[in-house]
Image (spheres, helix red, strand yellow):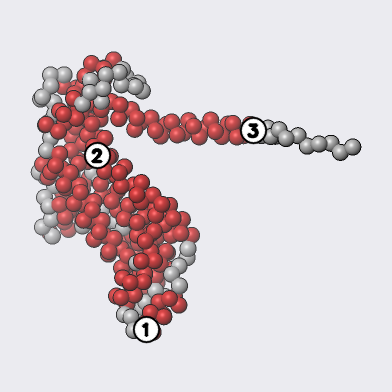
Amino acid sequence: MRKLKSDAPRRRRISLFTVINTILLCLVAFMMFYPFWYVLTGSFMSTDESVTNVFHFVVRRPTLDAYKTFFSSVDVGRHFLASFYASVFGMIISLICTSMAAYALSRRGLPGRTLVMKIVLGAMLFSGGLIPIYMVIRNLGMINTWESLWVPGLINLYYMIIMRTYFHGIPEELLDAARIDGAGEWRIFFKIVLPNALPILATIALFYMVDRWNDLMSGIIYINDVNDQPLQAMLYRIIQNQTGLAGSPVSSTVGTMRVTSETAGYAATIITMLPILCVYPFLQKYFVHGMMVGSLKD
């Protein structure tokens, strides 16, 4: 007599490796998420609670005092405009120049392509240093201008190589067919190459935007007027005040200087991070696809 199969679902056995792996991944996720949560909750704390609640997970009495103090004491609009100009406008110009250079170097018929690539790789390994770059920026008359925030890094050679690798994957037959129809190189580039390279363009655009938004040294070195410096330089001065290294524009409004500077620093950090956090979800699918294809094609 045949044994009937049980209708009850089989219990899935969980191996020891799965348990340990899950625990480790949860710990890593917590270690990466907690600093952001710590700053976010700290920005909504009152002065007294920030002293007593050191390792804060939950805010007992949320308040917007840190944000009100920060916005009333700092010209955020001017700093934000400097960061926005360097991140968005600089990203557009850099993306155009990088894509043009990458497309030219991806064509096998380009004379001297091997020599140019050797020069590019050499430039990635060796740099002139900070002082020569500063002298170039000064001689170009860009000190105390917002152009100094993005012109020195107009083309990132590493991003150009990634984009060049992606352009290698575009079929040469497609470009030859366009040439037979009478299309020139400029029309091929703008009408055929760029529309087929949206994933890598979105990826490199996000890279440039994040690099310029998080750039601290350019604002401090090339811009002497603190009112024209980007958001990261403003945040740096606030953090300096927390350690007692420099004065802060938010410390004079409230009597408890250290605590107010600390909570205002949390608020400034959240405000600085917010634009990139809002942009990234819209570019995430292009980012993942562009990185995978751009790193595997040859």
Does 204 appear above or below 59? Answer: below
* Callout 1 amino acid: Asp
- Per the image, the residue denoted by label 3 is 14
Instruction: Tell which tag, 2 or 1, sits nearer the viewer.
Output: 1
Element under disc 2: helix
Q: Residue at 48% of width from left, 30% of height from top?
A: 27
Q: Residue at 18% of width from left, 51% of height from top?
A: 85
Residue 282 position in % (x across, y down): 34, 49
- Per the image, the residue denoted by label 2 is 272
Residue 59 position in % (x across, y down): 31, 21
* Callout 3 amino acid: Ile
Q: CA distance from mark 2 to mark 1?
A: 49 Å
Towards the viewer: 117 or 194: 194
Element under disc 1: loop
Q: CA distance from mark 3 to mark 2?
A: 43 Å
Disc on the earlier residue, 1 or 3: 3
- Per the image, the residue denoted by label 1 is 181
Element under disc 3: loop
Towards the viewer: 279 or 96: 279
Q: CA distance from mark 1 to mark 3?
A: 61 Å
